[in-house]
Image (cartoon, rainbow, N blue to C red):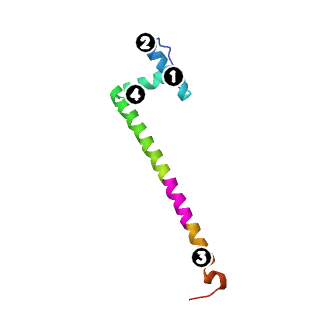
């Protein structure tokens, strides 16, 4: 990491609490969260854009979780159909006696 310079910043209690909560949830430090916020600000990303991105990310996660659950169901049904096909083939005269049509 590049060398860092100590900078004193005064935060409102709600800001400090929110940063501490966020840092704890992400396994980072408050200072790292502040540096990331400064980088976003310097890149021209607005708070409104970040809120929209966060909302879109939450929506996408819900939709992806729903799709994954649906695919799990589809896979279960497909496995059952393939098992049934195997069972039918095993019971057929061709499989049982080697009879060819």
In the drawing, does residue 95 fall left or right of residue 58?
A: right
Magenta residues span 71-81
The CA span between labels 1 and 3 is: 59 Å
Q: Earlier in the sequence, mark 1 or mark 2?
A: 2
Measuring from the top left, give residue 60's x and y in whole percent: 41, 42
Report the residue at 66% width, 82% height from top: 96
In the picture, residue 94 is in which quadrant?
bottom right
Which residue is label 2 attached to?
12
In the rendered image, the quadrant that contains the N terminus is top right
Q: Mark 1: which secondary structure?
A: helix
The single residue placed furthest to the right in the displayed view is 97
Which residue is label 4 attached to?
40
- Say whether marks 3 and 4 touch (CB < 8 Å): no
Which residue is label 3 attached to?
89
Measuring from the top left, give residue 3's x and y in whole percent: 53, 21
| Number of residues whose C-alpha sits closer than 10 Å to that of mark 1, classed few (under 14), some (14–19) or many (20 or more) | some
Q: Earlier in the sequence, mark 1 or mark 4?
A: 1
Q: Mark 4: which secondary structure?
A: helix
Q: Earlier in the sequence, mark 2 or mark 4?
A: 2
């Amino acid at each position: 990491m590049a060398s860092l310079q100590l900078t004193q910043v005064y935060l409102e209690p709600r800001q400090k609490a929110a940063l501490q909560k966020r840092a704890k949830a992400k396994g980072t430090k408050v200072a790292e969260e502040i540096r990331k916020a400064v980088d976003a600000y310097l890149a021209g990303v607005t708070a409104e854009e970040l809120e929209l991105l966060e909302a879109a990310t939450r929506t996408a996660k819900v939709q992806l979780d729903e799709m994954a659950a649906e695919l799990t169901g589809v896979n279960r049904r497909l496995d059952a159909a393939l098992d049934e096909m195997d069972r039918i083939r095993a019971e057929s005269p061709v499989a049982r006696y080697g009879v060819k049509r």
